[in-house]
Image (cartoon, rainbow, N blue to C red):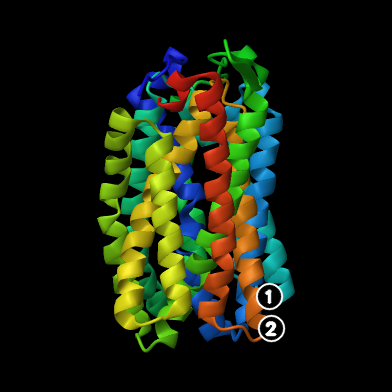
């Protein structure tokens, strides 16, 4: 896979590390979402529908913050955006610690998600400007997986020790680390290829706009995250429903998530041999098969094996989603929209799942409905691959 050159200022290890740190802090609540939503149910008495909608509100905020960053991406002032997002996220988490009723909590989490989404999207846009963006995306996913595992391991102990109030205050405090690292990031980022955002990809056989291809990629990101977040938000509840204890579920999620460290490494290795597109399509087909198996029968062994594969594929697809868009557009404008697309899918997934559960659907039926979204994602990326094969085979295999 060829890695295009980017703005050399973003190649500083310290700057890259600061961006990753900001992204991790901003994504922290989502990483622990199933345990947090389970605690809302157990400690505050929220219904299954309510906890799904709280998760949807937070992810809707992530979407709005990401859209804001994309709109202002041409200014290159990503550090300022990250600092503003951090301030909103800290305030939102502190306020959440003292709110215990559904409607106000959902509103506060919407605002908190907006701050987190602004910080996360600006950090991702910075990473996309580096000369070796694909490598940095792979490293970022590895760091994300490690952080996720630590959260899944620590959150049950934190909840039993200091409760939800202490947990949310901890989430707020975690933003202080990237805040201190902001001086390491240049104040203004000059786009590596500002004209590339709406450029055409040409060959002797046809023409296709980068905007159109990016639109299909972003649609695929949305559809994938609808299905993934629907399962992720209720993964703890699903495990409990088949006879596992909450601690056993937390341990399963932690161990399987740690194993998915191999996913981001495998994704990068496969992309060097076969490009981004073909391994991505294969991974999506595997994810579809897992959801199909779950929809027919949920058992303890099937749940554990499925979660293992789920994390592995999720880790791989996150690398490919960022890498595919970065190959199409080097300006960072469309890559900055990946968190927005993720936020849309991640807010819709728990909302739809909560709605279906409110209609007295079972977990297997909900997972069956999610197959439609995975199939749609697979179709979107098949279309992108097919169009690139028509007009520029080299880019299709990159």
Residue 397 seen in the current view: yes
Give the residue drawn at x 69%, y 83%.
Answer: 359
Q: Nearer the viewer, residue 128 or 118?
A: 128
Viewed as shown, does residue 2 lie left or right of 358?
left
Location of the C terminus (image quadrant): top left
Q: Nearer the viewer, residue 366 or 232?
A: 366
Labelled pair 2, 1 in contact (Cβ < 8 Å): yes
Q: Is residue 392 above or below residue 226?
A: above
Q: Position of residue 199 (x, y in %)?
A: 64, 16
Q: Which mark is residue 359?
A: 2
Q: Is residue 126 above or below residue 206?
A: below
Q: Nearer the viewer, residue 13 or 92?
A: 13
| Rendered image quadrant of residue 74 | top right
Give the residue drawn at x 55%, y 55%.
Answer: 375
Q: Position of residue 258 (x, y in %)?
A: 27, 57
Q: Nearer the viewer, residue 150 or 241?
A: 241
Single out the residue that lies furthest toward the bottom.
Answer: 243
Q: Which mark is residue 355?
A: 1
| Rendered image quadrant of residue 200 | top right
Location of the N terminus (image quadrant): top left
Neighbours of disc 1 within 10 Å: few (<14), some (14-19), many (20+): some
């Amino acid at each position: 896979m060829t890695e295009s050159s980017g703005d050399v200022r973003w190649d500083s290890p310290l700057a890259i590390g600061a961006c990753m740190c900001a992204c991790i802090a901003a994504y922290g609540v989502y990483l622990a979402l199933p345990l947090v939503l389970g605690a809302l149910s157990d400690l505050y008495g929220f219904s299954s529908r309510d906890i799904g909608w709280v998760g949807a509100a937070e992810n809707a905020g992530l979407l709005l913050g990401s859209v804001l960053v994309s709109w202002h991406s041409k200014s290159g002032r990503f550090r300022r955006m990250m600092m503003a997002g951090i301030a909103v996220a800290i305030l939102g988490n502190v306020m959440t610690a003292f709110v215990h009723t559904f409607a106000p909590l959902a509103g506060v989490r919407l605002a908190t998600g907006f701050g987190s989404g602004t910080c996360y999207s600006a950090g991702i846009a910075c990473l996309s400007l580096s000369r070796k963006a694909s490598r940095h995306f792979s490293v970022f996913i590895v760091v994300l997986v490690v952080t996720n595992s630590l959260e899944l391991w620590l959150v049950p102990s934190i909840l039993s020790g200091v409760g939800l109030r202490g947990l949310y205050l901890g989430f707020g405090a975690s933003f202080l680390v990237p805040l201190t690292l902001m001086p390491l990031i240049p104040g203004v980022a000059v786009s590596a290829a500002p004209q590339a955002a709406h450029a055409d990809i040409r060959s002797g056989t046809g023409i296709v706009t980068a905007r159109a291809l990016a639109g299909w990629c972003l649609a695929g990101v949305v559809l994938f995250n609808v299905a993934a977040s629907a399962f992720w938000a209720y993964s703890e509840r699903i495990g409990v429903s088949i006879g596992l204890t909450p601690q056993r579920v937390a341990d399963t999620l932690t161990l399987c998530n740690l194993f998915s460290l191999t996913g981001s490494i495998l994704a990068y290795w496969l992309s060097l041999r076969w490009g981004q597109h073909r391994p991505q399509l294969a991974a999506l087909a595997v994810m579809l098969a897992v959801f199909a198996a779950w929809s027919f029968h949920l058992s303890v062994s099937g749940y554990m094996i499925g979660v293992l594969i789920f994390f592995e594929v999720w880790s791989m697809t996150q690398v490919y989603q960022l890498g595919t868009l970065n190959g199409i557009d080097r300006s960072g404008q469309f890559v900055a929209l990946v968190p927005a697309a993720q936020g849309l899918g991640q807010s819709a997934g728990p909302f739809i799942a909560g709605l279906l559960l409110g209609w007295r659907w079972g977990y297997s039926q909900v997972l069956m409905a999610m197959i439609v979204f995975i199939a749609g994602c697979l179709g979107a990326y098949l279309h992108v691959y097919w169009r690139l094969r028509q007009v520029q085979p080299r880019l299709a295999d990159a």
